[in-house]
Amino acid sequence: MRILITGGAGFIGRHIAEHFQDRAEVRVLDNLRGGFKSNLSGLDCQLIVGSILDRDLVREAIKGVDFVFHLAAMMSVQESVQKPNECAEIRLAGKTTLRQVLVLYTRSAILVTNDSGPAHFASMTPIHVVTLFGPETPALFAARSPNAIALWAGIACSPCVNAYNNRQSVCRNNLCMQAITVDDVFKEVTGIYDSVKTTTFGN
Ligand SMILES: NC(=O)c1ccc[n+]([C@@H]2O[C@H](COP(=O)([O-])OP(=O)(O)OC[C@H]3O[C@@H](n4cnc5c(N)ncnc54)[C@H](O)[C@@H]3O)[C@@H](O)[C@H]2O)c1
């Protein structure tokens, strides 16, 4: 398996690259605008230095890749105010219309989200959806698509936000989210991915 991490030389990307050591071939696309080459030192990964706004480079970087983790971002608030268009382009936010998102869902295999909105919207397409629930309950908010899976630890204090407390919780230690591990999510995703691959490509 091969993964691509955009913004992989940054804070979160570095941790993902580390997590996938010995589990996947790791490729990073980062223009080092905010991240550092040294963040990846000691890790077995291929670093491609360049911008995700360079389409040819992205085409090259994505070749043979099974999963993309998109973390490239303009993190400076000041810079994002000075260059709002570039900031939105990097983050995809505001770059795609709702129609385009539907096309993106239709052409993609799996959506992993901690927001039930995109999951409900995705139900209009055949995409498989994995939604993480913590302070809310899948009993009320899970997407109704047959292709949707809800991951919820179901600990005693969850759900703690609802319409009656104006979605306010005093909780400052989100055990309900911490209980869902990276490995839990990855197991679901790879299971779905393997079945989708078999159905779509024969094997
Ligand atoms: N750190 C957090 O606590 C946190 C929490 C929630 C969400 N996030 C989100 O996760 C994402 C990553 O956060 P982070 O903390 O790792 O940020 P970071 O600044 O450490 O990493 C972002 C990386 O993107 C790279 N980058 C910027 N523009 C690029 C471009 N055009 N092409 C390629 N690479 C580019 C930067 O060089 C940097 O290495 C962001 O979208 C952030 O909003 C972060």
Image: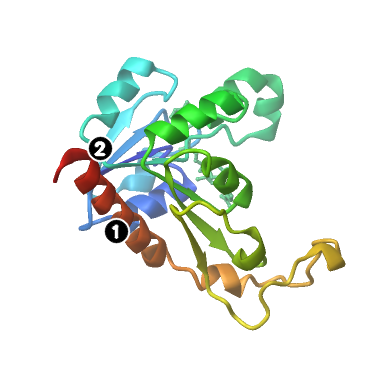
**Among the two numbered marks 2 and 1 on one chain, the one whose residue lies closer to the N terminus:** 2
Frontmost residue, 150 versus 10: 150
Frontmost residue, 150 versus 58: 150
Where residue 42 sits in the image (x, y, percent)?
26, 52
Where residue 12 sits in the image (x, y, percent)?
47, 50
Reply above or below: 60 against 11: above
Query: Residue at 80% across / 61% down in the picture?
Result: 167
Residue 32 shows in the view: yes
* Residue 37: image tag: none
Looking at the image, which residue sits at the far left? Answer: 203
Reply above or below: 136 against 74: below
Which picture quadrant has residue 176?
bottom right
Query: Residue at 45% across / 30% down in the picture?
Result: 104
Q: Is mark 1 within 8 Å of ligand 1?
A: no
Q: Say which element carries label 1.
A: helix
Reply above or below: 190 against 111: below
- The amino acid beneath tag 2 is Val
Q: Choose mark 2 or mark 1, whichever is in front.
A: 1
Q: Residues within 10 Å of mark 1 (few under 14, many from 20)?
A: few
Residue indicated by mark 1: 191
Which picture quadrant has residue 5?
top left
Frontmost residue, 9 versus 154: 154
Query: Residue at 44% across / 68% down in the picture?
Result: 181
Residue indicated by mark 2: 65
Q: In screen coordinates, is 165 left or right of 62?
A: right
- The amino acid beneath tag 1 is Gly
Q: Residues within 10 Å of mark 2 (few under 14, many from 20)?
A: some
Where residue 21 sits in the image (x, y, percent)?
25, 56
Residue 1 shows in the view: no
Query: Residue at 38% across / 52% down in the picture?
Result: 16
